[in-house]
Structure formats: structure tokens, C-alpha cells
Image: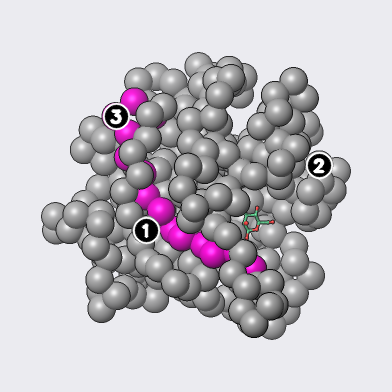
Amino acid sequence: MTFKLKRYATTPIMAPDIASPWENYNVFNPSVIYANGLFHMHYRAQGVDWISRIGYAVSADGVHFNRLRQPVLQPEYDYESRGVEDPRVTGIDGMFYMAYTAYGPYTGIGGIVADGSILPMIARSTNLIIWERLAPIVRGEDNKDHVLFPRKFNGRYLAFHRRRPFVWLAYSDDLYTWPETDMKQVFGPREDNWWDNTSVGGNGVPIETEHGWLAFYHAYDNTGTYRIGALLLDKESPGKVLARPKEPILWPEELWEMKGDVPRVVFSNANILVGDTVYVYYGGADHVIGLATCKLNDLLDFVLHA
Ligand code: BMA
């Protein structure tokens, strides 16, 4: 059994704005949350300085977005001086939380310039525009792709995060402390010649359904091609995988997914349910923003029976 999300169009729904220095190079990897009858998008934007900032746009139909002229989150501290990346916004008990990656300075060891430092951060907001930084989930390791679940479990917050090579669950009482001892492995890369054989990470906020949590994830294989897959997790114990189809549900096909800043990438931080439709927003080749959709029941059918 195979399944593919349906692209809204053969073109992206949002592209860089050449008139805007902070977003004239790339706009990609958006988060979208549906609240008060509107689609609210937070997206990663890069301008001529190549530093990532988070932009905000809003839409009544989920397709045509109006952008704010200024970013809503941009580097302020040393630990994020090379950019704030890949937002994932969740609403919990009337508050909005943004999980994002703070990209810090190069760390030179013995004169060798290594990669930058990464912090999986959480910020909060009551209005989706003004954000207050809270704390990172972990420090001192290669860890990103974190996202909060939209409700608490036994009074505790729950988040996916990626500690290579697995996606893990972390628990917190207060969003500041995420005890290492409570972290659990959930899933990882699969067999050698599969699409998700090299690296996996979580996507947008998982969707709670009668069958369990429908979670989306991204993965790349040994050619570096990023695809999107789905899996089902137990409703009360989301660390337990109930079903994981062999095949992905979206992969690069259009020219703007094949070529851009990074080739052959569809990368999503947003899979939201509005009515009976799942809207998946994604970055195409780290350069533009696309939209693909499906009916929730069709996808559940695939995940449960593939
Ligand atoms: C990941 C993240 C994403 C990016 C993807 C493909 O590691 O940095 O933001 O879209 O790589 O380049």
C-alpha cells in the first residue's frame, strides 16, 4: 500500500521577499498553528547575512499569507548569534510555546574550526508575536527537532527531541528542567536500503486521534535526500510506536524541492488538522515554502494498514 500527500499546487505558496533584507534569500521550514479561525505561520528566514530569523505570517484560508515586515524572533544573545531556526509552535492550556534551535558561535578546538553550537530552545507567548525565551531541553550535545505535545501527561509537559540517532521523549514539570533520567528512546533510522536509513527527526506537533498520536517525521538516506513519513504512537504512552509504514508520504519531486539552497529536501515543522484535512507545510530545498494536504482518515488508514 502506498500513499502520497497531495501538493496544493506545483508551485510554492511562499518565496523569499527580495524587498526585505532579512528574508530575501530563503524562507523555509515553517510552523503553522490554527487558532481563532486563522492560520498563524512562523517561518525560518535568511537574508543577505545568511543568519536565520523567525518571521510571522497569517492567513484566513491556509494558502494566502500576509507577512509582518519584521521578524518576531532574531538573535539577541551570543548562544544564538548565528541564527534562530526551525520553529515549532504548540498551544497548551491557553499559552503558545515555540520550540526552536539556537545556533551559536563556532567552537574552535586547537585552532580547528568546528561546527557551531546548537541549543534546542523553548520560548513562550500569549499573542504569537512577542516571545519570551525560557530554557533549552538539553545542553552540550547535537540535539534539535524538538516539539512539545499539545497537552500535559499526568501533569507533565512532554516533548520529542532528537539525540542521534534516535528520536526521544523528554518530560518536564515546569519547562525549565528536563531530567536526563526521564528521557526515552522512541524510534530511529531503519534498514540499509530504506529511505530513513541514516537520520531521523520529529516534525510538527503530533495530532491526537482515536487510534493514538499521529506523528510526522523527516529522515534522510545515504544520498542526503530528505523525505517525510508518518507513524502512530500509543495515546497514553506516546513512547510506544503502534505502527510505522515502510514508505514515506512525501518526497522531493518538484524542481523547487530538488534545487535550492540545499538540494532534494522536503522538511516540515507543521502538520495541522483543520476540519477533516491535514495541512502539511514544508520547506522546499531550504529555499521556499510548499503545502501538501490529505484527509485525516485516508492517512490513518494508510498508517494502520500499510
Ligand atoms: C536540517 C535542519 C533543517 C534543514 C535540513 C536540510 O539539519 O538544519 O533546518 O532544512 O537540515 O538542510
| Side (left or right) of 41 relative to 219 | left
Residue 222 appears in the picture as rendered: yes
Magenta range is 115-128
Q: Which residue is mark 3?
A: 126
Crowd band around label 2 with a 10 angstrom C-alpha radius: few (<14), some (14–19), many (20+): many
Distance (Cα) linking label 2 and label 3: 35 Å
| Side (left or right) of 229 relative to 214 | right
Q: Tag 2 or tag 1, which sits nearer the N-term?
A: 1
Secondary structure found at label 2: helix
Find residue 150 and report its horizontal and vertical position in percent. 31, 46
Residue 153 appears in the picture as rendered: no
Where residue 279 sits, quadrant-wise, is top right
Q: Are marks 2 and 3 in contact (CB under 8 Å)?
A: no
Crowd band around label 1 with a 10 angstrom C-alpha radius: few (<14), some (14–19), many (20+): many
Where residue 284 sits, quadrant-wise, is top right
Q: Which residue is mark 2?
A: 256
Distance (Cα) linking label 1 and label 2: 33 Å
